[in-house]
Amino acid sequence: MSTGAARFAELHIDHVQRAFGDTVALRGMDLTIKGGEFIALLGPSGCGKSTALNCLAGLLPLTGGKITMDGKRIDDLPPERRGFGMVFQNYALFPHMSVRRNIGFGLSMRKVGKTELNRRVDEAIKLVQLTEHEHKFPAQLSGGQQQRVAIARAIVLEPPLVLMDEPLSNLDASLRLEMRTEIRRLHQSLGLTTVYVTHDQEEALALADRLVVLRLGEVQQIGSPEDVYAHPTNAYVAGFMGYRNMLRVTVESVDGENAVVTGEGVRLAGVNRESLPSGAAAVAAVRPEDFSLVVPNAASTENTVSAVVEIVEYHGREQAVEARLPSGEQLHVRTNSRLAPGDTVQLRVPVERVLIFAEGSSS
Amino acid sequence: MTATLEKPPPPLEKASLKHRLAERGVDRTLWLLVPGAIFVVVLFLYPVLYGLQLSFQPKDGGGPFGNYIKFFSDPYLRDTIWITLRLGLPAALINVLASIPIAFQLRGKFRGKRTITTMLVVPITLGTVLTAQGLIEYLGRAGWFNRVLLTLGVDEPIRLVHNYWGVLFSLVITGFPFAFLLTLSYLSGIDPSLEQAAATLGASRRDRFRHITLPLLAPGLAITFCLTFVLAFSVFPSAIMVGEPSGETHVMSIAAYETAFRDFDYSLGAAVAMLMALVMLAVIALVLVWRATLYRGATGGKG
């Protein structure tokens, strides 16, 4: 079933807005989706990502803006005439229909002939490895199997766009990893354009070609996983992308791209991501794994902080360490070295791995 | 094996009787059932069994089935079955069918939902007498409805009370709130994302109702039908007040009342009451047999 999917070249989401009464769930979202892309909408609950998806599906009317597919306006079409496949968070399988009838439902609504319908349903069932369960009812399946049915039901129509609303959030951890790979595999083999909503940054990074980070209904950053991971645009995105250390600092001096900041008893040089002037209040964001241990009394103390180890968690190859700065601020560090509570450590972080953002843009 | 050489293991100590009983749900909380059980025996079981044995002892003799033979050989009595069914079945059907679209429109959350629901349910509190009074005032020969028709140039006032129609209207007015409340709760139990999923799969509004909502609602509709049918089948006050109790609306409950308390033939009255119960049970059994063929599982999204 790798052929026949109705591809589009470009889908434009043009300043789409959605308000519920006085609360605005989505304020002016702009995004262009290219055919075959895998897009992840990422953000915590209430950021508008599900609203955006429902607007795309046609389940929620827009209160502003428009959506066009290859120049054709589609935001005034009801969901049944958009022809997008959707995978719901709670699967939304029809409980009174067998697996086969669930998967064939969309085809029969489209008046596809019986032989054609059976062939395509067979193919879809085989693709999600449910052949031996095809006559069971949803209630007789495990969570992972139900999830597969939901996916098969959406992709059997070979829709131009597949929408997935946190499809893995109801599964347990190991199954979630397995299904994640499955979704990636399906996307690679079928090339179906997909918009995937999640609050899990790891999931988004693993699956997507492009990430859209949302906060309070506003787009914070759009970019490739590498881009968003290494170069977040503001403190909020950084916090979401695993920059767990957010030190409250003041910009001391600016030098081109870089700046030196002080605060919390530390002095660090880092990348001035938002071109802050000296004297500005800022946060310095550092990933736990970007710290490295410095041998005691090393000659150079450039870009180092000293801290006292408080809690050590064993994670196999590395340790998660919680340490405290002299100012009392907590520091999250990951390291391969064996440390014990009470140790005083010198930690170095490369200049390019300290990101300096304006204060107040974090969550 | 060396088992013969060793001492046999000490027998497992048996759990106390109290624990074993508790395992089967027998404990002191069972006493809570006593008032209910007494209630059922004294106020339901005993009267029914008493009435049943009474119906087999005809006043005028003629063997244990004398009353039943009499009932079926007297057209005035026999026809009550058909007369009552002719009222009860359409009334129940109208109530169920009317409640579906209204409940369908009201199932979501919106402003004023409570007001509308309250207005629809108010007739429950009115009682049959008030409803009957209102029907006579409104639909009677000199009621507003006919006066409007007469001014519009209709020659004869239409008879809508003191006959079949009056009773049917009364049954619909008093039975609808029950049907509506039940249907609304069954509908609210269906996960709205199922319909959304069907929509994204290309199902039109009509298809969604036909293939998703209706099949999931049908078992609930069957129960709703049974309950409103039972209510309508035992109609008594409105059959007298807005009906024609000696003719078109000579329903079974009137027949039972008349034989027992006008003709003082308690035995025949009991037989009529037993037959009334039998007819109701037969209709309910038919509906439940049909219901058994439907999907009756969960109606949530996860199946």
Image: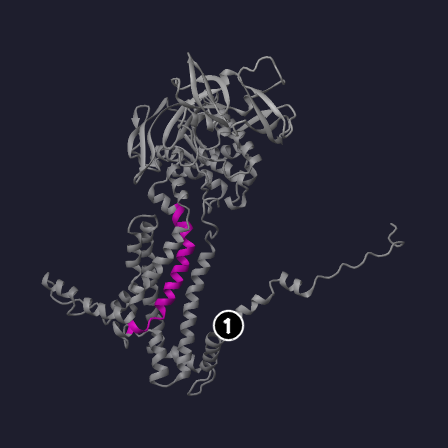
The answer to which quarter of the image holds residue B67 is bottom left
Q: Of A178 and A16, which appears nearest the observer? A: A16
Element on which disc 1 rests: helix
Compared to residue B188, the image places residue A34 above or below, namely above
Q: Is residue A4 visible?
A: no
Query: In the shown orientation, is residue A41 left or right of residue B83?
Result: right
Residue A208 position in % (x across, y down): 47, 25
Residue B93 or residue B200, whichever sits in front: B200
Secondary structure mainly formed by the magenta segment = helix
Query: Any magenta on residue B224?
Result: yes
Q: Residue furthest bottom?
A: B60
Q: Is residue B299 above or below residue B225?
A: above
Please state the horizontal and vertical placement of residue A134, each as a whole percent of the image: 53, 40
Residue denoted by label 1:
B35
Mark 1 is surrounded, within 10 Å at the Cα level, by few (under 14), some (14 to 19) or many (20 or more) other residues, namely few
Magenta region, residue range: B211-239
Q: Chain of mark 1?
A: B
Given the image, on which type of amino acid does mark 1 rest? Pro
The part of the image, by quadrant, that contains residue A18 is top left
Q: Position of residue B236 (x, y in %)?
A: 32, 73
On screen, residue B281 above or below B73: above
Colour basis: one colour
Q: Nearer the viewer, residue A190 or A67?
A: A67
B25 part of magenta stretch: no
- Which residue sits at x=43%, y=85%? B58
Specify the quadrant of the image occupied by residue A283: top left
Residue A337, position as x, y percentages in the image: 64, 23
Inspect this view and state whether residue A77 appears.
Answer: yes
Q: Count the marks.
A: 1
